[in-house]
Image: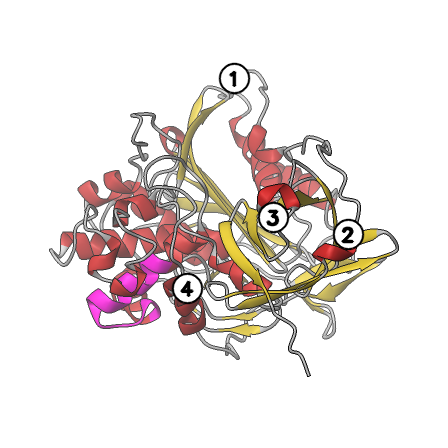
Amino acid sequence: MTTPIARCLAVAALSISILPAIAAEDDADRAIAGVMGAFVKPGEPGCTVGVAQGGALTHALAFGMADLERSKPLDTHSIINLASVSKQFTAFALLLLEQDGKLKLDDPVVKYLPELAKSAQGVTLRHLLHHTGGLRDYIEMLYMKGRQDWDGATIDEAFRSLARQTAPNEAPGVEYEYSNTGFFLLGVVIARVSGESLAEFSERRIFGPLGMKNTSIVDSYPAAIPALARGYSKSGAGFRLYETGWEQVGDGQVHSDLYDLALWDENFYTAKLGGRALIDRMQEVGVLNSGKAIDYAAGLRVYEWRGLHWVSHSGSWVGYRSMITRVPGEHFSVIMLCNREDANTGVLARQVAEIFLKDKLGPPEPDSEDEEPVQAPVTAAWQPADLARFAGAYTSEEADARCLLDERGGQLYLETCAAGERLTPGNAGEFVTDGGGLKLKFPSGGQDTGSFVYWSSGLRGLPFHRVKESSE
């Protein structure tokens, strides 16, 4: 059903104990194998699972394959792209620089990144740390230009796309909206202030001091990591490789294994690196302009669930999924690292946690984090008579992108910048994609077809103008 269970084999740094190898599985191992075996079938990509208790990595197991082509199984030393679990390392690096007196969280972003002056006025480093900066989504802009997840994309390209913006999505501090842009920009700030790349600074100030010998930030490809598990997505009855050449850091790109992450996790208790004040700041949640507290701290979600206090973060990027969830009051954590796109690490980690905490947990309760939001149906408020009037090419200087509207078979389609999305009428002058996640707003209730405003959750109010046809 699974690959052999591997136990921790060495004594690690910073006083976290590693239990010696044992020959037989214990009851907890069998229970974890039951959870994971229901998800990971023989010959499939899978997950590594770590349980840390009282300063010890008490359980380390691996299920599934690291490399299907080479028939290589995952083991507990397999390295996984942590995706957004990386954000807590960026936050820690930022707070180290604050501790050094090199910056302050309430400094304006444009103090360090003046190229953003047109769109980031009033945005502070603190806003970015708590996802309240209101800036546009650089990933969606790169998608709009035709970039795919498996393409190459550089730090410089992403930063230049943000420097072209003339407006934010929302004023800073007004709302919480999860933002890869914010943490990507914090990574750029750390590099400028420290004079090192985020990868170099993190190695020197975090990974090295904690003894995290198998952890690195990948900011250029190809990545020479022999123990790296390949990333996969479902494809019919099997799996296909699903990996990336994107080099943006700050919001992602930390690569690590169970043992190193156990060292990182234990530092939240010992505070040997950074000190107690910094660790406490990592867990201070943000506050909106209205005074409302959110549940997001510094690269960490902080919340109550089933009567216990939890500190967690998940990660999701191409064929990798990750989760570190901690219950500080029980000195307990679950680390879940998967190399398959369909892994719900939040659900799996909590199922593992329930094995150990069943006597501590309160009654079951709804968990909105694991539920997909339901899109309300779109009701058409107008019916344009001639869809061909809207067909043509439109460009955006801010997005450095070209969108083509094509009318065929009595339907309007958005091409090139959104890959064949069908558009239907919404409110007057608007066309929306199925489900209403993306809107094109034409002026004058749709009478004027010379421009539209592109509207999505990540790119609100991005102007496009029709390309004038040249005359012979």
Circle 4 residue = 249
Q: CA distance from mark 4 to mark 3?
A: 36 Å
Is tag 4's residue or tag 2's residue first in the polypeptide sequence?
A: 4
Name the kind of residue labelled 2 in the image: Leu
Name the kind of residue labelled 1 in the image: Gly
Residue 284: x %, y % from top left: 28, 35
Whether tag 3 and tag 1 are in contact, CB under 8 A, the answer is no
Find residue 387 and name its label. 2
Whether tag 2 and tag 3 are in contact, CB under 8 A, the answer is no
Q: Is residue 214 visible?
A: no
The answer to which image quadrant residue 151 occupies is bottom right
Q: CA distance from mark 1 to mark 4?
A: 38 Å
Tell me the colour scheme of the image.
secondary structure
Bounds of the magenta segment: 185-199
Circle 3 residue = 442
Is tag 3's residue or tag 1's residue first in the polypeptide sequence?
A: 1
Name the kind of residue labelled 4 in the image: Val
Residue 117: x %, y % from top left: 28, 59
Name the kind of residue labelled 3 in the image: Phe
Q: Residues within 10 Å of mark 3 (few under 14, many from 20)?
A: many
Q: CA distance from mark 1 to mark 2?
A: 56 Å
Residue 247: x %, y % from top left: 47, 70
